[in-house]
Image (spheres, grey):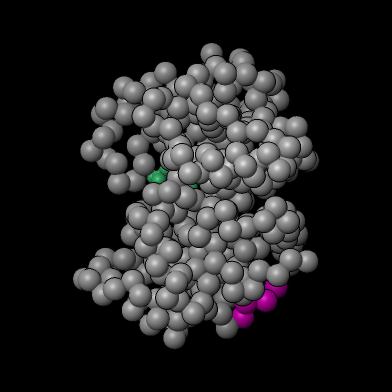
Amino acid sequence: NVNLKNKDLLSLMDYSTEEILSLIEDAMDLKAKHQNGDIISPLKGKTLGMIFEKSSTRTRVSFEAGMMQLGGNALYLNGKDLQLGRGETVADTAKVLSQFIDVIMIRTFEHEKVVELAKHADIPVINGLTDDFHPCQALADLLTIYEHKKTFQKLKVSYIGDGNNVAHSLMIACAKVGIDFTIACPKGYEPKEFVVKYATEVAKENHSTITVTESPIEAAKDADVLYADVWTSMGQEEESANRLKVFAPYQINEELVKYAKDDYLFLHCLPAHREEEVTAAIIDGPNSVVFQQAGNRMHVQKALLQAIL
Ligand code: CP
Ligand code: NVA
């Protein structure tokens, strides 16, 4: 088994293929135990602090419930209520929290803030979403894909929409496990160059490919998985009217899914906007596994917490 003790999860770039596969395996084991009603308490006496500077339903509840199920405790720390919100430095916050708790999860805007927190904390730090990455989501996405397809080999996963945090992490996750990944996005909304470059190199080592295209049809063609996220992420609210126009041709709907394989899976990190990035017919239809995907957040995060603690 791989050793992840005290390791941060800032982005999946820091995790090897072996480490990611081991987390997925542990998550399946923990999920089976949970469904079986087994009570386990490996994290008895441990506390997770969760700093939120953006809204959350899934991340907050899955981390909190998951930590409790492992016998530990979780604290919800609203960024505005912390002295951090009144200008205490990230470094001092990291050093102080390290005196009390065993692991920090943070959801914020600039990725650099999470890097800074991890640099100064004596305890592991987990990225619960930044403007650039959402690694816990991508781990849950991999688990969901694996549960349905029973393999990561010879799969085409296509993300259609904004080249954002969720797209970045999914791209890296696919590259790490050898899935062919395609992203279709409008000009000006492509994933960041350094992420595409990194993922392309990793994919090559794992005999898979990364494709960036403007064409949703090219992405949808023969896809095993179609993936959508919101067109306007948290922090971009003032761009939303313009984004609605720019992204309109990138909606996942009945027409577009005709290009995918018959047994394609529809994934969405949620929250979703029906009739924007995806029609109700698709997200509420037979190929959609979005609620299983949401549920898997808890199982992968339990595996992660157990491994790093
Ligand atoms: N997918 C996800 O991270 O959801 P929340 O914003 O509700 O945490
Ligand atoms: N890209 C979205 C994901 C929400 C889970 C956002 O950052 O708001």
Residue 288 visible, this angle: no
Asked which quadrant contains residue 272, the reply is top left
Residue 183 visible, this angle: yes
In this view, 49 is above or below 236: below
Span colored in magenta: 40-44
Q: Nearer the viewer, residue 43 or 204?
A: 204
Q: Nearer the viewer, residue 81 or 5?
A: 5
Residue 219, x across and y down, in percent: 57, 23
| Left or right of 143 on screen, residue 97 | left
Image quadrant containing the N terminus: bottom right
In this view, 211 is above or below 53: above
Which residue is the extreme one toward the bottom?
A: 99
Residue 95, x across and y down, in percent: 40, 81
Residue 154, x across and y down, in percent: 75, 32
Asked which quadrant contains residue 197, the reply is top right
In this view, 279 is above or below 164: above
